[in-house]
Image (tube, grey):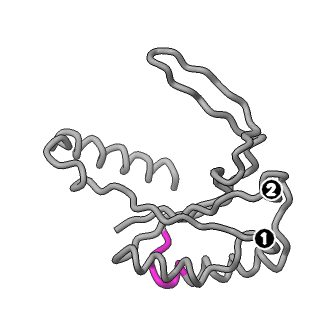
Amino acid sequence: MRFMIIVKASADSEAGIMPSEELLTAMGNYNEELAKAGILVDCDGLQPSSKGARVRFSGEQRTVIDGPFIETKVLIAGYWIWEVKSKQEAIDWVKCCPNPMPGTDAEIEIRPVYAKEDFGAEFTPESCEQEERVRAQAKRSNL
């Protein structure tokens, strides 16, 4: 099972305050543990929402909204993608994570990623083949 592990933003991360050397080292060590355990698929930190944008869809209309976004508690500061056996395994790994926002309360959300099987009959063999082609192309592009 794949899970997205979402690190929620804080006032400091939204202000662009960079993590300390101590936190970077602790997170580097944690990421190394994840990689050695064979569960780490991808991970990264995100810059503040002030450097981002949102695109709002309303029918055929598209509206671009530039950051910053004020709802800090629902913003994302970083993420991991893990391949684990269960939600409980993901929870257990998150509980070992260094506090991503030292000096404040922090929250990490764990969300399952859809698998092909989750879509049922609507995910046709043609759709499956297309997804496999897209993933293969993306993998080649990222080498």
Q: Position of residue 86 (x, y in %)?
A: 35, 76
Q: Dot 1 surroundings within 10 Å: few (below 14), some, or many (20 or more)? A: few
Nearest to N terminus: mark 2 or mark 1: 2
Q: Secondary structure at mark 2?
A: helix
Three-letter amino acid code at the position of disc 2: Ala
Q: Where, quadrant-wise, is the N terminus in this rendering? A: bottom left
Q: Residue at x 37, y 49 (%)?
A: 135
Q: Position of residue 10 (x, y in %)?
A: 75, 59
Residue 143 versus residue 15: which sits nearer the camera? 15
- In the shown orientation, is residue 81 left or right of residue 125? right
- In the shown orientation, is residue 143 left or right of residue 112? right
Which residues, given as a range, are shown in magenta? 34-40
Q: Position of residue 53 (x, y in %)?
A: 67, 34
- In the shown orientation, is residue 128 left or right of residue 22? left
Residue 94 versus residue 135: which sits nearer the camera? 94
Q: CA distance from mark 2 to mark 1?
A: 10 Å
Check the image and report above or below for 60 versus 64.
above
To which residue does mark 1 refer? 104
Number of numbered discs:
2
Please say whether residue 115 is one of the residues in the magenta stretch.
no
Query: Based on the displayed image, in which of its 4 quarters is residue 102 positioned?
Result: bottom right
Three-letter amino acid code at the position of disc 1: Thr
Residue 91 versus residue 116: which sits nearer the camera? 91
CB under 8 Å between discs 2 and 1: yes
Q: Which of the labelled discs sits on residue 114, or is there none?
A: none
Q: Which of the labelled discs sits on residue 11, or is there none?
A: 2
Q: Position of residue 123 (x, y in %)?
A: 20, 43
Q: Residue at x 49, y 20 (%)?
A: 58
Please say whether residue 36 is one of the residues in the magenta stretch.
yes
Query: Based on the displayed image, in which of its 4 quarters is residue 94 positioned?
Result: bottom right
